[in-house]
Structures are given as C-alpha cells and as structure tokens.
C-alpha cells in the first residue's frame, strides 16, 4: 500500500464560540439549529460536499480549497493544522 502526505495548503477557519456564533453562521452560510434556546446550546447546520453536518460550540468551521465549508472537532483540527502568522 502506498503512503501519502497531505499537501501543505493554507485554509481559513474559525472556532465556533458563543461570542462569534452569528459571525461564523453568516460566514459559512449555515443554518441555526435550535433557534429558540440560548446560544450556548445552539448548533450550526452546514451543507458540506458530504451532506449536511452540524458544528457545535468549540468545533472549528473550515473553508476548504474549493470554497466549501465543513465542521471539524478541535482535537482533529489541532492535530492537522498549525496557525500561520
């Protein structure tokens, strides 16, 4: 079996927090889930290339190389990406 290395590309991402919830929602053109409860219990539904997925508080929302959006759990994001300065 062949082995492959992920190409070093720069992506845009935002970690979803209570403070930036509306900003991320607008950025990724998502849909608010659980509208009538406090923000700390809401999620964002994102239409991805693989279908609809949900981003919870703490998750990262990534804009991929083709402009697509998708959520990513913090542990996977931190193991996969380094911040570019």
Image (cartoon, rainbow, N blue to C red):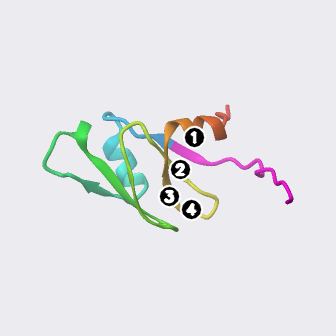
Is 53 rendered above or below residue 55? below
Prevailing secondary structure of the magenta residues: loop
Q: Would you name the residue on which mark 1 appears?
A: 77
Query: In the picture provided, is 52 more to the left or to the right than 9?
Result: left
Nearest to viewer (mark 1 / mark 3): 1
Left or right: residue 17 versus residue 41 is: right
Q: In which quarter of the view is residue 75 placed?
A: top right
Residue ID at (44%, 41%): 59
> Residue placed at 36% from the left, 35% from the top?
17
Distance of label 2 from label 4 (alpha carbons): 9 Å
**Against 79, is 61 above or below?**
below
Determine which residue is flagged by label 2: 62
Residues marked 2 and 3 touching at CB (< 8 Å):
yes
**Camera-nearest label, 1 or 4:** 1
Relative height, residue 48 to residue 18 (above, below): below
Report the Cα–Cα distance between label 3 and label 4. 7 Å
Contact, mark 3 vs mark 4 (Cβ under 8 Å): no
Which residue carries the number 4 mark? 67
Q: Outermost residue toward the right?
A: 2
Q: Quadrant of residue 53?
A: bottom left
Magenta part of the protein: which range? 1-13
Residue to which mark 3 is pinned: 69
Mark 3, residues whose alpha carbon is within 10 Å: few (<14), some, or many (≥20)?
Answer: many
Distance, label 2 to label 3, CA atoms, is: 5 Å
Q: Is disc 2 placed on a helix, strand or loop?
A: strand
Percent across and percent down for residue 42 are 25, 45
Question: Which secondary structure lies at badge 1?
Answer: helix
């Amino acid at each position: 079996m062949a082995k492959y290395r992920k190409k070093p590309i720069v992506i845009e991402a935002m970690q979803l927090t209570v403070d930036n919830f509306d900003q991320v929602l607008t950025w990724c053109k998502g849909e608010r889930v659980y509208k009538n409860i406090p923000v700390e219990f809401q999620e964002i539904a994102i239409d991805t290339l693989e279908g609809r997925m949900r981003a919870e508080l703490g998750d990262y929302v990534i804009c991929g190389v083709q402009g697509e959006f998708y959520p990513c759990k913090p542990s996977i994001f931190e193991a996969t990406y380094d911040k570019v300065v």
